Image (cartoon, grey):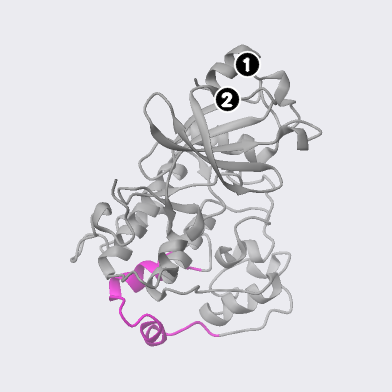
Amino acid sequence: MRLELTHQNITPNTDWTQTQQPLEHSQRMADRYSKNKKVGEGTYAVVYLGTQLSTNRSIAIKEIKTENFKDGLDMSAIREMKYLQELKHENIIELVDVFSDDSNNLNLVLEFLPSDLQHIIKDNTLTFKLPDVKSWTLMMLRGLHHCHRNGILHRDLKPDNLLISPNGNLKLADFGLARSLGTPDENLTSNVVTRWYRAPELLFGSRHYTEVVDLWAVGVIFAELLLRTPYLPGKDDADQVVVTFQALGTPTEDIWPGVSSLPHYNNIEKFPPPSRGELRNRFLAAPESALDLMCGLLIMDPNKRWDTTKSLMHHYFSERPPPTSPELLPGTKNP
């Protein structure tokens, strides 16, 4: 079954019960899957490990409790359904099915991915090599490139939203904050992206931004993979500003024209940008090409920050040693 989501049949104020299939059909859909084990629960959803009965395939079922919403379905659930239906790529989690059950709950059936990049980074029993970091970064950029060329911003890239399949493929997941690229004059919320991975234009409260907010997050995750520890771990929003600019330098009008006019650019402490030598000392094992890529992803001025195309074409990915094959990556759980 494919559930089409358009502005005509589901909007933020639409009652899900008015759009779902007849109960008999919904129950037939529910009978295709078993919910075997609860693996997570939040305010609005419960996640189960389950099985697709016809194939015996392991799947994850996110059961969204529609009773919690007075005016219809949670917007993040609508976004996740809509964009995952549009995005089919080996480095993006697969939405297998959507159905409603006899309690009017909405169920998203997703491919089961047993691990995530956060778990791998924190697992001290695993040893990373530079080709492993190159492979994870390459897969991250390929999935993101597919999002951006289809006009979709992810807006919440972080290691625990980068899931790992049994054969080692990294896949972008959790599209609850995703949205279509806006027009240049459209106001967007700056309260997106988990704090440690938030681009400077968002820290300054910009209401106009582009897909390069995702590239900043990739740059921070890339640094985290090289360090095996968080790169810019702010304690709160105010501290995030200090931590970010202390590490990378405070942007000025000279390097980012117009930055001083952004809403939260006031009383900012001025820190100098790090020299190349300082970066080499921070990332002792990283080759020059890796530092080049990182610096391109972490350019302060969003108008100059690298996009996915420029990043993927960088010689870091083509020079030796080549990226590790996914099935040989640390932490891969081959079936």
Principal secondary structure, stretch drawn in magenta: helix
At mark 1, the secondary structure is: loop
Q: Nearer the viewer, residue 124 or 163?
A: 124
Q: Residue at x 42, y 71 (%)?
A: 223
Residues at discs 1 and 2 in contact (Cβ within 8 Å):
yes
Q: Which residue is mark 2?
A: 99
At mark 2, the secondary structure is: strand
Identify the magenta region: 272-299
Magenta stretch: includes residue 292:
yes
Magenta stretch: includes residue 293:
yes
First along the sequence among labels 1 and 2: 1
Residue most extreme to the front: 36
Residue 300: x and y, percent?
53, 68
Residue type marked 2 = Phe
Note whether 15 is above or below 242 in the view shown.
Answer: above
Residue 268: x and y, percent?
69, 79
Question: Splitting the image into 4 quarters, where does residue 262 fall?
Answer: bottom right
Numbered tag placed on residue 231 in the rendering: none
Q: Which residue is mark 1?
A: 21
Residue 238: x and y, percent?
70, 74
